[in-house]
Image (cartoon, rainbow, N blue to C red):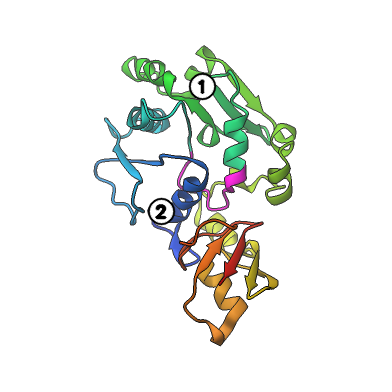
Amino acid sequence: MGRSKPALPWHGSTMLERIVALLCRACDPVVVVHAASQELPHLPPGVIGAVDAHEGRGPLEGIAAGLRAIDGRAGAAYVSSSDVPLLHPAFVAAVASALGDADVALPEVGGRVHPLAGCYRTSLLPDVQALLDSGRLRLSFLFDDVAVRRLGSDDLLADERVARFDPSLDSLRNLNTPAEYEAALAEPEPAVRVTVRGKAQTVHAASVGRALDLALGERREHALVTLNGLEPGASDSTPLVAGDEVSLH
């Protein structure tokens, strides 16, 4: 990309801030793994930071750091890269629920395996560490030795919410070049529903603030905002995805 992916702007936020906030809807706790020398955008309260034990050893090192950070706190972890701003929480939930009795739930779509969109049991930490200690850094080595459930497009789209809100499986779309980033940024923002005093309309917005600006224009006022019928607390920077419902009280 030529510059830090986590810090890339995304509709009033950064890619990392957006992805973390979306993961917080489906996962608890959320861990951000980074190199010791890496600067990160602001992270919300409660998000755990974890540092690679050794820099430059790829995704396997990052997975080890993440699994170590939640050891004893969760039975499995969804693993995400920091360059998937089109991620949908429904996709995360579908991959996690597909784990079943396997060790890894691994999307395999479009002829590609997507290890940074999979769900891993935390009990795999010794296996991951053994690979690191032996210098076998490719994730495929892990998949050779444990029980993997591979998820094709049909498996993922069998989930009703994924089929409805992420039918193209854009949750798997990572941005690797400036051209890919600019193209994705120029696409229409997610279609969301905004209800103000009982009147609803659909707008295209990637954040609560953008949705309210479009719905209210110059009539924008401070008020209580709820997202998807949950307790009030959504702020202007709260990210939105397709199917979200914002209510102004």
Q: Residue at x 54, y 56 (%)?
A: 230
Front position in the image: 206 or 194: 194
Query: SS of the residue at dot 1?
Result: helix
Residue located farthest toward the left when viewing the structure as drawn: 37
What kind of residue is marked 2?
A: Gly
One can see residue 207 in this view? no
Q: Which residue is mark 1?
A: 140
Residue 239 horizontal/vertical position (percent): 51, 59
Q: Residue at x 69, y 51 (%)?
A: 165
Front position in the image: 175 or 82: 82
Residue 238 lies in magenta, yes or no? no
Query: SS of the residue at dot 2?
Result: loop
One can see residue 145 in this view? yes
Q: What's drawn in magenta, residue-wise?
A: 80-90
Q: Quadrant of the C terminus?
A: bottom right
Q: Which residue is mark 2?
A: 2
